[in-house]
Amino acid sequence: MVENLKSLSNCAAFLDRDGVITELEEYQEKDKVKFILKKEDIKIMSGAIESIKILNKNNIKVIIISNQPQIARGLITEEQAQKITNELINHFRQHNAIIDAVYYCPHHPTLGLGNYRIDCECRKPKHGMLLKASKEHDIDLNKSWMVGDRISDIKSGYDAGCKTIGVKTGYACNDGFNDATPDYLVDNIEKATEIIIKNSRGKLS
């Protein structure tokens, strides 16, 4: 069993944040959502804490990969975004669920203000954040997974070489794009975690 855990140490579950482990709040207009602008806006998705604990137990790194265009739009600063991130990490830690790292893109190619208005390499569907995480945390992307509620998440994971799982929470991979298809489409983060654990163990048998 120890050998199994050691061989999984360079495997990661890359999780989108909003719509996967935190809930989206819809505006009255269709397909419009409220951004998380302060820590009080955070609502943890049902099953997210237990799912991350299971990934931790199986020695699979948990890394959040998220677009945060509210920074680019001037709705919050990067400092405020970091406080929200810290609050999220601490909330999970209080329940013995460990998030190993968080990467977010603060840019937007058309709606960003000032230096944030760029066509960067980190904003999903590009996979710059996954490449950076793989280098900084010694992760084998071909053994890893990207879990998201949008096709941009799936495309990012696919291009990075990960297996991909779409969840039916949040946008439910029904956000109007069709340039990628998830390897699996499941109800929620709990079901996604089951697939990750099952397949990761299968590679070791």
Image (spheres, helix red, strand yellow):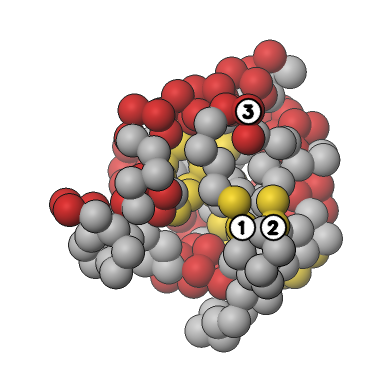
Marks counted in the figure total 3
Mark 1 neighbour class, 10 Å CA radius: few under 14, some 14 to 19, many 20 or more: some
Can you name the residue that lies furthest to the top here? 94
Q: What is the three-letter code of the residue carrying label 2?
A: Glu
Badge 2 element: strand
Mark 3 secondary-structure assignment? helix
Residue drawn at (54%, 48%), measured in percent from left and top?
35
Which mark is on residue 26?
2
Is 114 above or below relative to 47?
A: below
Is mark 2 in CB contact (under 8 Å) with mark 1? yes
* Amino acid at circle 1: Val
Look at the image and tell me in which quarter the N terminus lies. Answer: top right
Q: Residue at x 53, y 63 (%)?
A: 153
Q: Position of residue 102 (x, y in %)?
A: 46, 36
> Where is mark 1, residue-wise?
33
Pointer 3: residues within 10 angstroms few (<14), some, or many (20+)? few
| Residue 66, x across and y down, in percent | 48, 49
* Residue 45 visible in the displayed image: yes
* Residue in the image at 61% along x and 57% along y: 33
Q: Is residue 129 visible?
A: no
Residue 154's spot in the image, x, y percent? 55, 68
Task: Check if mark 2's residue and mark 3's residue have beta carbons within 8 Å.
Answer: no
Q: What numbered label is drawn on residue 40? A: 3
Q: Which residue is nearer to you in this view: 146 or 48?
A: 48
